[in-house]
Image (cartoon, helix red, strand yellow):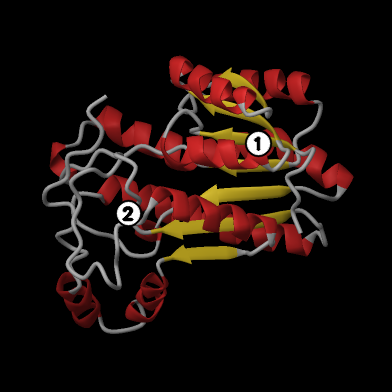
Amino acid sequence: MTDFNGKGVVLTGAASGIGRLMAIGIASAGGRVALWDIDESGLENVRAEIVAAGGHAVPVRCNLSDRGSVKQAAAQTLQALGSVDVLINNAGVVSGKDLLEISDEQIELTFNVNALALFWTTRAFLPAMLERDCGHIVTIASAGGIAGTAKLVDYCSSKFAAVGFDDSLRAELKSRKSKVMTTVICPYYIDTGMFAGVSTRFPAILPILDPDKSVRRILAAVSKNRRRLIMPWFVYTTYLMRLAPVALSDWALDFFGVTHSMDRFIGRKS
């Protein structure tokens, strides 16, 4: 089991959305949380919430699209916490545009934050975990890392990379006979504002997920050392769809409304 009590936890994307909720949940469980985000005011607000509730949190401004900023944030975190037992790679960005409408800079930002940052944060903290032969690396990926959809070409591609990152890292750690754990989380759309405007055709089986319930399930999965959590259960069927002929798989994604789920996407205005 991964017990958060007394553990040093790095959480990226902690200033808002499920990152904020996870930070509060981990701190309430006794974790010492390093809050990473580029939004300094948001970080301070979350830190204040945690401290007011009697928890421990350290705000660390980090631009995850900049490898140098990640290294600097890692050094600051180690100085503040002493050691890192759990790394939760949660930060993510989404453009929500057709491939030909996205700027080159936006595509690069998507991959820098959603995919490449996983490498820089893990390389910063994994060596010490291997030396202690314990630790936990969590990747918040997406159902979009299992099946792609329109207006998310850059996002889904980066999340496919995130899922592959976890798969390969898990295999690498197993080959080393290491006790360091990994967990990958693949949720459908979560109602945090990041995907404001998305729709679902059959909410009974493909609901827009509630943030509080989602975070409780994520933290429970990490605590229980689950290797993979996919939400909701229906998303598991997309694995089977990938084994079907492409025309049938495409028809299914279209029928269940996934293909057009981003048609009225708004996203966060800030």
Q: Which residue shows up at 76% across the image and 63% down it? A: 175
Of 247 and 135, the residue lying toward us: 135
* Cα gap from disc 2 to disc 1, whole angstroms: 25 Å
Measured as percent of width and height from the top left, residue 55 is found at 68, 29
**Front position among marks 2 and 1:** 1
From the top left corner, tell me how far across and down residue 37 is, in percent.
50, 25
Residue 24: x and y in percent read: 57, 36
Q: Which residue, given by chain and number where applicable, does mark 1 sit on?
A: 27
| Front in this rendered view, residue 66 or 45 | 45
Q: Nearer the viewer, residue 54 or 128?
A: 54
Percent position (x, y) of residue 210? 37, 53
At horizontal 80% and vertical 43% (from top left) the residue drawn is 129
| Residue type for callout 2 | Tyr
| Residue 244, placed above or below residue 15 | below
Where 127 sits versus 258, above or below?
Answer: above
Tell me the residue at 21%/82% (across/down).
248
> Circle 1 — which element?
helix
Q: Residues within 10 Å of mark 2 (few under 14, many from 20)?
A: many
Secondary element under disc 2, as helix, strand or loop, is loop
Q: Find disc 2 in the rendering and name its residue.
A: 189
Indicate the amino acid at tag 1: Ala
Question: In which quadrant of the rendered image does the N terminus lie?
Answer: bottom right
The reply to whether residue 115 is in sight is yes
